[in-house]
Amino acid sequence: MDRGIFITFEGIEGSGKTTQAKLITERLKNEGFKAIYTYEPGDTKVGSLIRNILLDPSVQINSTCELLLYFADRVQHIEEKIKSYLMDGFTVICDRFTDSTVAYQGYGRGLSLQLILKLNETLLGSFKPDLTVLLDLPAAEGLKRNEKINKKDRFELENLAFHERVRQGYLEIAKFDPKRFIVVDATKDFDEINEEIYRHILWVLKK
Ligand code: TMP
């Protein structure tokens, strides 16, 4: 059996990536593809405990400790879930992955990009997404959308400048790896975005 395709969704808060990732997974399933939605941090038993620490607004975390917790979650996630689904031929749709770490801990928090990439290489080797969908929009717009639904975890409490650095970070990462990325304008109409992503994924799956 062929290994499945590993697709990640990335974007700042309020970009709509979680809703789109879930809907795309459902569309693929309805079309008869084997597909599974998963997310980081938190989609394993250990991961959900790590997620609680990471997002708790009452917990102060040193940035390097935060970085290591994201990688701890990722290593468990890959070994426990992602790899086994891929081996079973599933298209794995993952809501956030290493690009989030580069964007948030690297560009957002200012940790060394070299350290993050070295950690990634040491822990994950050559394992990386086959395709990454980046939903891009101005940070102010994303935060406004989140305000409406009153989301307030440790990252959502960060200021606008932090989220704008994260956004610019994502755009830089995408620029350096254009073959892996599609960058979608997340200010567009929701259904239009969904169609654009879905068409692209179908094209990748049928290649
Ligand atoms: P979520 O809101 O998409 O569930 O993600 C939780 C938060 O974790 C979000 O604010 C982004 C942040 N995050 C990082 O800072 N680094 C990472 O590596 C990942 C996966 C998420």
Image (cartoon, rainbow, N blue to C red):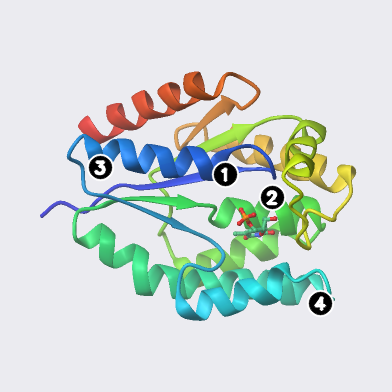
Residue 195 spot, x, y in % from top left: 41, 22
Q: Quadrant of residue 89?
A: bottom left
Disc 2, ligand 1: is the CB inside 8 Å? Answer: yes
Residue 60 spot, x, y in % from top left: 84, 76
Q: Kindly identify which residue carries mark 3.
A: 29
Cα distance between the residues tagged 4 and 3: 39 Å
Q: Amino acid at mark 4?
A: Val
Q: Amino acid at mark 3?
A: Lys
Q: Residue furthest left?
A: 1
Looking at marks 4 and 3 on the same chain, the residue that comes earlier in the sequence is marked by 3
Q: Is residue 19 above or below residue 84?
A: above
Residue 78 spot, x, y in % from top left: 41, 68
Disc 2 secondary structure class: helix
Name the front one of labels 4 and 1.
Answer: 4
In this rendered view, identify the residue nearer to me: 140 or 152.
152
Q: Amino acid at mark 1?
A: Glu
Q: Quadrant of ligand 1?
A: bottom right
In this rendered view, identify the residue nearer to me: 3 or 26.
26
Looking at marks 4 and 1 on the same chain, the residue that comes earlier in the sequence is marked by 1
Name the front one of labels 3 and 2.
Answer: 3
Cα distance between the residues tagged 4 and 1: 25 Å
Q: Kindly identify which residue carries mark 2.
A: 103
Q: Kindly identify which residue carries mark 1.
A: 10
In this rendered view, identify the residue nearer to me: 107 or 88.
88
Give the quarter of the figure containing the C terminus.
top left
Mark 3 and mark 4 in contact (Cβ < 8 Å)?
A: no
Mark 2 and mark 1 in contact (Cβ < 8 Å)?
A: yes
Cα distance between the residues tagged 1 and 2: 10 Å
